[in-house]
Image: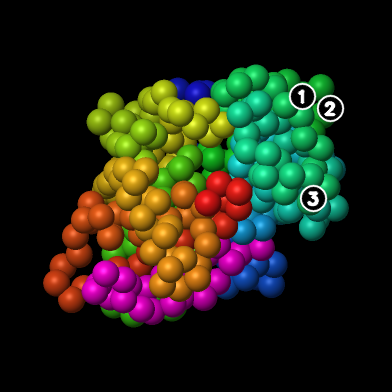
Amino acid sequence: MTDATTTAAPPRVFRSDVRAARKRLAGQLRKTPVFHTTVAGLPVSLKLEYLQHGGTFQLRGSLNALLTAAPRPTQVVLAAGGNAGIAAALAAARLGRACTVVVPETAPHSKVAAMWSHGAEVRWHGTTHAEACARAVELAAERGALYLPVHDTPAVVAGAGVLGLELEEQVRGRPPVLAAVGGGALIGGLAAALGRRQRVIGVEPERRALLRAALGAERPVGVPAADSAGPDRVGAIAFDIARRADVPALTVTDDAVDAARDLLWREFRIAVEPSGAAALAALVSGAFVPEPGRRTIVVLCGANGDPAAR
């Protein structure tokens, strides 16, 4: 289950929505740098999005969603087990709004601590993301607060897409873009921004291949996963965009992700969490094979891993 439970056609997000989000977010985000280098002998442009405020790309979407909500909410409630909660907590704090994050009991303690550090109220409920979502909906209704579906809201996807507009300015030649799938906001936003003019490729772990399952079933479907703190299916908005933009879903093993993280630290002293290294894992493991001599953009999207787990 994700934040979206309706079977109706999802709202569409277009490049015009992403461009509007960029204007709205001007001065509130870091335009994260791109590092042009070689990895395993291959030309690569690393988009250092892990340097975003809060250590996650998801701040882009959370800020955009709160800035576009009408009427302007005084408090926001959401369900999240990781970076989406951190981003929403930070966005709410910046805008002077109260924020409550409902997290499953399986949520990493390091990420819960980060939510607290940005002033969020954190409530534990259930053992899965779906159970946390159900409680967050109830809590928002009880309080008259805005409920924010952090993976499946048009403004969240459009905000994430601003990253794609930055890449157009930072890297010439429109090379393919590898990015982690997660709940779908990142690849959905990238594909909405870039369309078919620049190829976007989703990467996800074999044990949690949400986009691959959706593309196979032609609709978002639940995927049992070891990581029960996160959504069990890709967002409907992102799936619709991925299908229209022909975004493929590549899968990588946990070992490949670990190897990519080790490479980033060994060669560049870059420390990212597993989801942040998934895109690079596809390149160095051979899951994605670029055209000879062709540059690839790799989005390093998150830096909120547990230091004790390395």
Residue receiving disc 1: 139
Residue receiving disc 2: 143
Classify mark 1: helix, strand or loop: helix
Label 2 Cα neighbours within 10 Å, binned few <14 / some 14-19 / many ≥20: few
Q: Residue 245: image x %, image y %?
A: 30, 51
- Identify the mark at residue 117; answer none if there is no mark: 3
Q: Amino acid at mark 3?
A: Ser
Classify mark 2: helix, strand or loop: helix
Give, as a single range, the part of the protein colored magenta.
32-53
Residue 216 in view, yes or no: yes
Q: Residue 273: image x %, image y %?
A: 51, 52
Residue at x 37%, y 58% (from the top left corner): 260
Inspect the magenta stretch and tell me whether residue 52 lies in it: yes
On the picture, is 59 further left or further right than 16?
A: right
- Say which of 155 and 38 sits in front: 38
Query: From the viewer's perspective, is the residue at label 3 or at label 1 nearer?
Result: 3
Label 1 Cα neighbours within 10 Å, binned few <14 / some 14-19 / many ≥20: some
Q: CA distance from mark 1 to mark 2?
A: 6 Å
Residue 172 vertical placement versus 3 (above, below): below
Q: CA distance from mark 3 to mark 1?
A: 22 Å
Q: CA distance from mark 3 to mark 2?
A: 23 Å
Residue 95 vertical placement versus 154 (above, below): below
- Say which of 284 and 125 sits in front: 284
Color scheme of the displayed model: rainbow
Mark toward the start of the polypeptide (3 vs 1): 3
- Dots 3 and 2: beta carbons under 8 Å? no
